[in-house]
Amino acid sequence: MRHLLLPPGLAVLACLYATTGQAHEDSIHCEAVTESVAEAGFDDVVTVTCTDNQALIAGDTYPDHEMMTGIIGTNEQVPVPAVNYASPITLVPVSGTEPHTRDAALGVAVNGVPIYDYTAGGEMSQSDLATYQANLDTVATGQLDACGGHAGRGDDYHYHAAPTCMIDQMANKGPDAIIGWAFDGFPIYADTNPDGTAIAAGVLDVCNGQADDVFGYRYHTSEGAPYIIQCLMGEVPDIDALPRVRPLGASEGGRGPEAGQPPRGGVDDLVFVQDDDGTRTMTYSYQGGDYYIKYAPSETENCYNFETRTVTNGGELFEQELCRE
């Protein structure tokens, strides 16, 4: 049997759970969340602040790894850093009696990037959780980049599958490394058990989780659907109050562009590049035509000058300053 040398915070949690059946010391849970970010090497871009009942993992949701390139089923959205985005992690996790879903983030990776379920297109019902949603599968429909993420309706980058590029960057990369946290307070691990052993077929529940000796419960990523956390098995005080990244808005106070629609059949040769001056450009072709979205920071804080020709707007030139609120 392989014995793990746990960090101090996790060692105390393991002892508490062994004696009480719950890892309910909120100060120790705060330490575990904080250590997971620091040991992964992301504490220079992500901050963890603990309140009486939550650990707030704050960042701009914009990772320092390749993004977007290789997507086929693009929704013609691009990643723009968020403003004051903080993910609340419950410090006293309690297992619930039924799974909870929402059409937004269910947790956050240790690099501050939100984690969604594997689908695109809206919240899943209880019956949907038990049935594979092939037409909404972001992996199978080519909507994700090689890193397991894409930009959503809010022009926010997030993961729908295992964050492979982030995992490769982690200073503590390994089976026992926590790669993220669900909003209900339980940790997320990669494809294997923390001791490196394979997870037997049928062990993971509908939310892609299982019992854990340290935290009481843990989630996993997986090679097959649902690929990542699919729902929240723990209790969440107010699921409707969990954070969302607001879509970009026009600088004059009006509405920004409507969310894009995936071009039928997908696009070709999608590439996303970032220049040293802050300019970002996503180019792609569709049915013989060339399209692009180009944007760069404007003179207004948290605003960007956009120039686009997309399939969604019929190839017409669109120019506007769009801002994060």
Image (cartoon, rainbow, N blue to C red):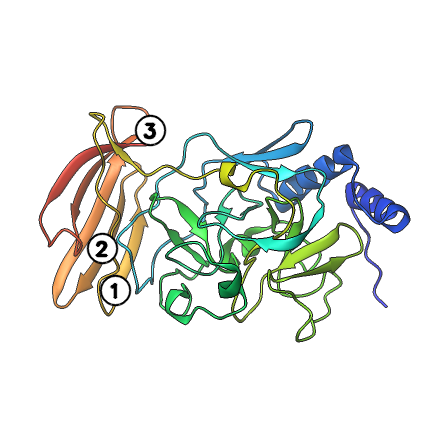
Could you say where residue 14 lies in the image, as x and y percent from the top left?
83, 49
Q: Residue 209's quadrant in the figure?
A: bottom right
- Tell me which amino acid carries mark 3: Asn
Residue at image mark 1: 269
Q: Which residue is pictured at 56% across the width and 57% down the height?
A: 229
Is 120 situated above or below 9? below
Which residue is most to the right? 19
Label 2: element kind: strand
| Residue 302: numbered disc | 3
Residue at image mark 2: 283
Q: Which residue is pictured at 81% across the width and 46% down the height?
A: 22
Q: Would you call the spot at circle 3 few (<14 residues within 10 Å), some (14-19), or many (20 or more)?
A: some
Could you say where residue 69 lies in the image, as x and y percent from the top left?
34, 58
- Tell me which amino acid carries mark 2: Thr
Label 3: element kind: loop
**In the shown orientation, is residue 70 left or right of residue 181?**
left
**In the shown orientation, is residue 227 left or right of residue 122?**
right
Q: Residue 13's quadrant in the figure?
A: top right
Q: Quadrant of the C terminus?
A: top left
Comparing 184 with 318, the one in front is 184
